Image (cartoon, grey):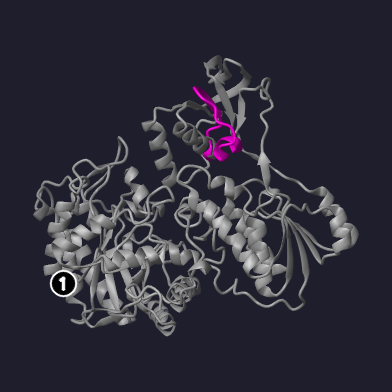
Amino acid sequence: MMFPKLFSPIKIRDLELKNRIVLPAMGTKFTRDRCINDQIINFHVARAKGGTGLSILEVSSVHAPSAPGHYFSIAEDRFIPGLQRFNEAVHAAGSKTAIQLWQGSIAVGADPNAQIIVASDMPVSPEYTIPGASRELIAELVECYGQAARRAVEAGFDSMEIHMAHNYILHSFLSGGINRRTDEYGGSLENRARFPLAVIDAVRARMPGGMPLFMRIDAHDDYLEGGLTIEEVIRFCKWAGERGVDVLDISRGNIITAGLKYEVPPIDLEKGFNIGNAARIREETGMITVGVGRINDPALAEEILEAGKVDMVVMGRAQIADPEFCNKAREGLVDDIVRCIGCNQGCYDANERQDIPHITCLRNPAVGLEAEYELKAADVPKTVAIAGGGMAGMELACTLKRRGHNPILFEASDALGGQFILAGMAPRKAEMKDAAIHLGKQAQKMGVDVRLNTALTPAVLEELKPDAVVSAAGAKPIRLNVPGADGANVFSYPEILRGERVPSGHVVVVGGGMVGLETAESLIQAGCKVTVAEMLPEMAADLGTTRKIIIMENLHKAGVTLCTNTKCLRIQPDGVVVDREGSAETIPCDAAVVAVGAASTVTPELEEAAKKLGVPYYAIGDTVKPRRAIDATAEAAKLARRI
């Protein structure tokens, strides 16, 4: 067995877990009525079958008036039967279970019908202030937590976790950066801890003596003046341990500051970035501790556990990307693991985008569709010609091959990966390049017919006579159509990211989307002074919040000048002439880089050739419209199940 420490059992009170891997509570958007459904069950069952030791059902409301519709609830007895069904299914699949008890404070605000409860008075407009929770409401919430624990026991959970982080109500009371009360629930740490400790007492009182209690808590507060220090957290954890908490699940981050980047850490943050905090808390409390923070590699998890830094590890997005992560790691099939790359496009960003109904994954488009997307062997194997070996083309080819089809992948260049290889050349994004290379190797390993340095043309199609034709030809950089755009001092963003040409001095980047800002970071690393000119009123409008926070922070620290509402009119040898909020001005510079996005590589000739052959023609990914990589792999996964 590979990774013996990671896959060794651990006993907590009467509960024995078969390994040290936790599938944590993660927001999924799988419900609209607070009820358990097949979608959430299928999601957890897939990971239970995949070998996880403990499956934690995501934040579940304990208080009915403040329960938002898009989260699960345990606030009423009517939810018990659904929760029982969840437990029966996950237990049968081989995993132990827990539920995360939660009252969301300001996080419930996305549902206009949910009551917002705050620790202390919170002005939201000149006319209205949300009042801090009254003593009567605090007592009501304590009882609600206790009743939720009773229901969790009746529903058959093996353990439960109290959520005491991320600006939710218990963290809001505990943190001096949020709690401004002047009564017995505010001021000193002892006072701020009064309500959270009462909740622990109420929960523990409704639990069997042999059932372990977990607590998720931030290691400290980030970017929050007067917030929790790690010393305060350690003191509180000791008190919690005395009241019956068995396991500390050490998280980080909050939703009201840039500390949000630590809640669902993107690719920009170092793997295992929070383990040092967890190790210190474990050492000073002597309690069983769970480590969290971009742990997506079994070797890293093994190293952390062997070093005695923590006792268990959260591997959440790692198991979103590959539900078989645990089984593959245990069996030594490490090269077959589909790795989470921290792009956050399908998990965290899904909670910000109305066009994504629930979480998904760039690397695993079957998330939330586990039943519908179960692969079925093709009734009639078909030869499918695919133009383009980027992420869409590779995802399509691999899935078709698994179904028994004969995909032939044509790539005009000498390597697979397409735009994702280029994306992985930006600062801190090497994992994206690695993922593209890995997928290409997997395609070849499973026997996909890959033809490099070979364009798919009508002549090739006429000779091949496939059963279907798919264009996944991707996109190419847009050429800026202004005077001077072809000057010797003008560079393209691919040249910068690949290091093919490197300007010096003051550089103006035309385009302030993701590509433009990542190009700006590359130029900073090359020693350039940088100005970014963006015609829209917002920089990084195409970036999710967590990645945007980090990139904007880095640009600010580096002294990059960011100009919005600034349209490029022409490029001269000595500068870039722009229209800035209606006025023409020149930004002096030594070079300019065009990073205004990409345009589809359209293939009407392939569509016409397919028509002549009388076979279906499909287009996916950026060939249809330049978008995020997650859209490309999603379309590929869907099409692969239709053919």
- Image coordinates of residue 159 in percent, x first then y, are 28, 76
The image quadrant that residue 364 belongs to is bottom right
**146 on left or right of 579:** left
Callout 1 crowding tier (Cα within 10 Å): few <14, some 14–19, many ≥20: some
- Image coordinates of residue 71 in percent, x first then y, are 40, 63
Q: Vertically, is 157 above or below 359?
A: below
- Image coordinates of residue 255 in percent, x first then y, are 33, 48
Taking depth in this image into account, of 593 and 149 the one nearest to the observer is: 593
Taking depth in this image into account, of 362 and 136 the one nearest to the observer is: 362
Query: In the rendered structure, which segment of residues is drawn in magenta?
Result: 493-514
**6 on left or right of 142:** right
Taking depth in this image into account, of 291 and 170 the one nearest to the observer is: 291
Farthest residue in the right direction?
Answer: 612
Q: Residue at x 55, y 69 (%)?
A: 369
Q: Split into 4 quadrants, where in the image is the C terminus? A: bottom right
Q: Vertically, is 343 above or below 198?
A: above
Q: Which residue is mark 1?
A: 244
* Residue 213 visible in this rendered orientation of the protein: yes
Q: Vertically, is 226 above or below 11?
A: above
Q: Residue at x 44, y 51 (%)?
A: 267
**399 magenta-colored:** no
Q: Secondary structure at mark 1?
A: loop
Q: Vertically, is 282 above or below 608?
A: below
**641 on left or right of 92:** right
Q: Residue at x 15, y 47 (%)?
A: 181
The image quadrant that residue 233 belongs to is bottom left
Amino acid marked by disc 1? Gly
- Image coordinates of residue 418 in percent, x first then y, are 64, 50
Q: Residue at x 27, y 46 (%)?
A: 222
Q: Split into 4 quadrants, where in the image is the N terminus? A: bottom left
Count of numbered tags: 1
* Residue 62 visible in this rendered orientation of the protein: no
